[in-house]
Amino acid sequence: MPTQGSSNESEHDPQLDELRKILFGEENQHITGAIRQDARQIVSDVFSEALKDRQDRDGSVKKVMTPLVDKSVEYSVANRKEQFVGYLYPIVGSVVRKSVTAFLTEFIERTNQLLENSLTIKGLTWRVKARQAGVPYANYVASQTFNYRVEQVFLIHRETGLLLNSLAYNQQSSADADLISSMLTAINDFVSDSFKPNADGNEQGLDIVKTDDFTLVLKAGPRAVLVAAVTGNMPQRVADQLQLTIEEIHTLYEGPLADFNGDTSAFADCDQQLTDCLVSELKDQATGKKSKPWMAWCILILLACGTSFYAYKLWLVQGYINQIQALNQEPGIMLIRAQRDGIQEVKLDILRDPDAQPINTWLEAHEIPAEAISLTEKRFLSLESQIIHARLRDLLSNYPGIALTSDGNTLTGELTQQQHHALSADLAQLPGVTDPQSLLATIQVSDRPTLALDTKDSAMTLIKLKISLINSTSVEFASNSTQLSPQAEQSLASLASHAKALLSLAGQAQLDVSFIIIGASDAKGSQSYNEVLSIKRAQTVRDTLQEYGLPSDKLNAIGIGIIDVPDAGNGARKVLFNVITTQASRSNG
Amino acid sequence: MIQKKICLLGASGVGKTSLIKQFVEGIFSEKYLTSIGVKIDKKQVECEAGSVQFMLWDIEGIDRYCGFQPKYLRGAGAIIIVVDQTRSQSLIEGIEIFKLARDMSDIPAILAINKSDLDSTWHWDEDELKELSAPFSYTFLTSAKTGANVELLFSTLAQHLLSEAGS
């Protein structure tokens, strides 16, 4: 039976097939048809559970779903903006607040970190060491802070050497991944071609490439190579992770890898897998306690000191400037400009009368240090009464007998004639003194000759002074008159006293002096009449002077008739004086 | 955008490196530089059908005494055989290299007759050249120095590859 059975079995095979066809239909279509009918029901019964089980088993559901969800959200955002705004509106406010808070926190932390890195001994040492080693500071910090870090991951198509995707820890510092992957492939080709195949007959391939700073780890699958650039001491588990990832990528992207024709867009979604490879491990920070950035504190304190010193200086200088404004009240001093120059100097431009108080004395009195002031002083003559009085007092120091009255308007004391003249001349030259005669009015003039004490030169000077005084005197008359007016009488009295003084001086200086009295008239009337009139006028003056006690032999009256000066008016009706001096012949003879 | 690996092959001194330099940077360095092993550059070409990023593998000058590294051709989208129209020998070597490369794959090949700025001093006549260049997809008379036909060569190649990828 068994043999028969077995032979029957082979014989009945076609029958069984027939039976199967009848039961299950062509190509099992009865079964699949039945299942398909309820497929929706069957799958929906276990769908969630199946997803969960698979996710629990190897986590692949998440990886498959993520790009799908990303795409769906992207689609919704692009096409149904309004609705999305509606969904998001209530939460946007709090999201913004949160992100601002997060940003601020991060910013403060970064600043702290920066301070710590830049202004602590550790930071400075690292900087120096990084410079010595010729690596960027950031890389050095990473090497000191991390045990290891995967800086960049490349997924490379094995056959063409084209880059499928890459991911870097720090996007800015990532090198040109396209070229790197091609070069790596070329180097790998070179290695596999240059060395004999290994014991299993497989090609030699790069596994790990080490440089000073980097370790390149290559994990090759049948169609793609995963390369990670790692800094620091790489542990085995990085290589293990790469192995897992490359296997996973081969599973998920089997089709696209096999049919790769240069289009890398199919691999844009494998970021998820590559992210798993970007691992790093921080060094155990033995320094649990936060070291204080004391250098930062030092710099801050120095800055504060500097600022307050500067402010103090400014305040001081500003104070001086305010004080200096009071200089304007001082007589004979005019403040043109007082302004700050730098932080410790005041530029001071002033005008000062030579008789006013010296600026340095004033500054001293007000306790302003002279070194804080850069002074530009120009002279001027002030007409303020205090200064005029000061000038007068200066002058009077040459005249011991004379004093200024307390009201400053008159002088008192006694002078010789000669001193009186000298003082009068000095006063006339003193700026600001408007009426020297009134100042002199109350001074008593003594007639005591003091010439003996004087030199001949000074006597001559005095004589010349008197002569010019007399020569410049004139007496005016009314039209067609020979009568002296009261003013004329007064000026003649003064002239007589001057003439007497001159005579006495001349006598001492051994000079002969005579006075010529010249009468003149205007052009009204006949010439002969006017000549007579002019002589009469001269004679009237001569007579008056004789009455004042001048010797008649010294007085010569002449008339010159008409002085024909058009528009002269009263000017022509006058008597003029002229003094003639000669060496005294008598005394010689 | 698609990416394609392109290999440039040819005898020493025919101007492969200069051709790439002209294409990638648009300039030509007078200084002659023997490429060591392989040098890789990249350049993106835009054309109507899309854009292609070329990874240009400049493979060391080859002569009859040393073969070339066949692995470098692996996965290439096209090869460009460069010859020098001032040296007959370079064409013979170029054809030999082309035959070697054909043994490995039947990717499109382009013949670039370089140094067109100089007078042609080889003894090939038109018919012989036509016959020799028949197996190539395209033939260009290029000059790395003046840039003549360089852009055209690569843009034609880009269009060819894009149409190939599309079909």
Image (spheres, rainbow, N blue to C red):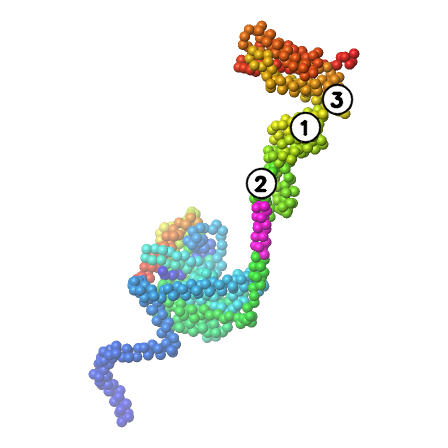
Which residue sits at x=32%, y=59%? B163
Q: Residue furthest left?
A: A22
Residue neighbourhood size for the residue with mark 3, other residues' Cα within 10 Å, grouped as few (<14), some (14–19), many (≥20): few
Letter of the chain that mark 3 sits on in the rendering = A
Quarter of the image holding residue A121? bottom right
The residue labelled by disc 2 is A328
Q: Disc 2 marks which amino acid?
A: Asn
Q: Nearer the viewer, mark 1 or mark 2?
A: 1
Determine the residue located farthest toward the bottom in the rendered image.
Answer: A1
The mark that comes first in sequence, 3 or 1, is 1
The residue sitting at 54% across, 67% down in the picture is: A144
Over which residues does the magenta segment extend?
A: A305-323
SS label for mark 3: helix
Q: Say if residue B68 shows up in the picture.
A: no
Look at mark 1 in the image and give the residue it sits on: A443
Q: What is the C-alpha distance between the residues marked 3 and 1?
A: 26 Å
- Residue designated by label 3: A456
Chain letter of the residue carrying label 2: A
The location of residue B140, given as percent across then percent down, is 37, 52
Residue type at mark 3: give it. Answer: Lys
Quarter that holds the C terminus of chain B: bottom left
Q: Amino acid at mark 1?
A: Ile
Above or below residue A305? Residue A349 is above
Is disc 2 placed on a helix, strand or loop?
helix
The disc, 3 or 2, on the residue closer to the chain's N-terminal end is: 2
Q: Is residue A40 above or below residue A356?
A: below
- Asked if residue B121 is among those painted magenta in the image, a careful observer would answer no
Secondary element type, mark 1: loop
Residue A203 found in image quarter: bottom left
Foreground residue, A109 or A77?
A109
Q: Position of residue B116 (x, y in %)?
A: 41, 49
